[in-house]
Amino acid sequence: MFRKLLLYNFGSQLFARVISFIINLNFYRIIDGDLLGLINVQLTLMYNTALFLSREPVRRTVLANNGKFKELIATMWISFGLSIIFGIILSVVWMVTLMNVSSNYQDKYFFMIFMFFLSIIVEGFSEPFAMSCMKLGESERFLIAQGVLVFLQKVSSAFLIFIFKFDHVNGLCYGQLIGSIDTSGYVMTFTKSLSLKEQATYDAIEKIGSLAVRIILKPLEEAAQIFYNSKSTDGIGIVGLVIAIFSSPYSGIAVRILLGENLLKYANGALLLSAYAKVLVIMAINGLTECLAMSLMNEIQISKHGIFLFGLGISNIAVSIILSKNIGSIGFIISNGIHMVIRILYNCIFIDKIKYTKFRPFSDYYLKKRTLFILFLSIIFTQLSYYIFEVNNMDKNLNILGIVNFSFYDLIHIAIGFLILIVLSLSILKLEYSNFKISSSLLHRKLN
């Protein structure tokens, strides 16, 4: 049963998220950064908050109740009423908040908030049916519906904007209606620490980073739930090092390809992506330590752990506010990195007490000297390529598919990085994973 649900969840969610991510990449190129900040951060936060407050308490109550299904129907519909109440309250709060935000879309604030309010009501109306599916053991239908919802929100917006040539505001709002709580979103919305363009850039970079976490590092973390040994940590560490090496010299090109020139120019998207890439390995190692720590905890310890995480979350908000006001949107990434390191240390201390052994995920493995030397050479060559072909290169005279502006030097820089990545990957496989070999017997057969 679990494998079946996992298959439905993975299939529907991954497909929908990847498609919506690709559509978002095109939005970032053609839609103004102020509008993206309003829609993707401010109003999406209102939408998610209203749904969370209206459905989570009711959903937990219904799923935990073992009474007759007919007796729970009335309880399910409470979520619809709550969605209307919270939708009205939060719409007023957001209207007051946005009135203090100056942009070119001030005359559209009421329309945008009203459309998101309608989408809250529509999804609130569907919540009793979703709870019925989960309660009756038809969770696969609910999971597919969730994927379809995410898919429709982005695809409908894309059709309205690209095919029917709708105004960008109308296209995004109607797409939201046709078609989920975030700390950094609250900080950006209510402290006004970032401009709307900076909020749009941070949201875009976070989407790229979170996609990398799900696709590249998440499988390593899940494997660590079964195998708590140095090899799992070793794999996470090496992947993190490789990401860190290539993040600085290639983040500018990555942002230009994925998000376009606008967000790169307005809010230093390359620096954000480079910083986010370096935090990825900390996020993955935190998942490793949290898996092991949670598996060793009893109910009382899990409750204490929850209190610790709540307090740490409050402090993370405070640090995010301070850093974002002083150094901009990169402050959110630094704050999250500090937050993850504290959680890792907390988990390590707990594991030490339970197992009476030292558990150090950062130092329980040692890379071979030749591997370290190759990693060091990779840093030197990628940085040299960056300073030779990118820093002093201002001409972007080569247009690819009418989307990305490149120069001949950009292509040389990319080719050098690609070759270095291939050599580095093959060297790591040969030196650190001797059991993972490209069979020499196959090569011998071909030669004969």
Image (tube, rainbow, N blue to C red):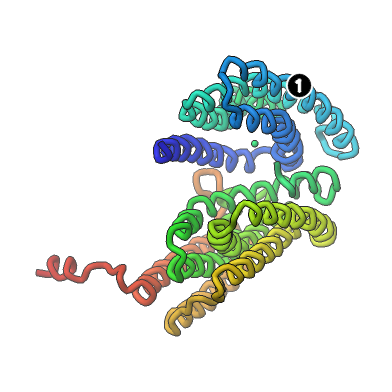
Residue 187 location in percent, x, y?
A: 80, 48
Residue 129 location in percent, x, y?
A: 57, 20
Residue 371 location in percent, x, y?
A: 44, 79
For the question of whether residue 227 can be seen, the reply is yes
Query: Residue at position x 65%, y 21% from top?
Result: 76
Q: How many circles with numbers are drawn on the protein? A: 1
Nearer to the camera, 421 or 182:
182
Q: Mark 1, residues whose alpha carbon is within 10 Å: few (<14), some, or many (≥20)?
A: many
Query: Residue at position x 84%, y 59% from top?
Result: 322
Q: In which quadrant of the rendered image does the N terminus lie?
A: top left
Residue farthest to the left, as pictured: 448
In the image, residue 136 sits, relative to residue 363, either above or below, namely above
Query: Residue at position x 69%, y 39% from top?
Result: 40
For the question of whether residue 280 can be seen, the reply is no
Residue 167 location in percent, x, y?
A: 69, 26
Nearer to the camera, 158 or 374:
374
Nearer to the camera, 347 or 232:
347
Q: In which quadrant of the rendered image does the C terminus lie?
A: bottom left
Q: Amino acid at mark 1?
A: Ile
Secondary structure state at the residue bearing disc 1: helix
Residue farthest to the bottom, as pictured: 369
Query: Residue at position x 77%, y 55% from top?
Result: 311
The quadrant where residue 43 appears = top right
Circle 1 residue: 84
In the image, residue 248 sits, relative to residue 324, either above or below, namely below
Left of 93 or right of it: where is 197?
left
Left of 193 or right of it: where is 420?
left
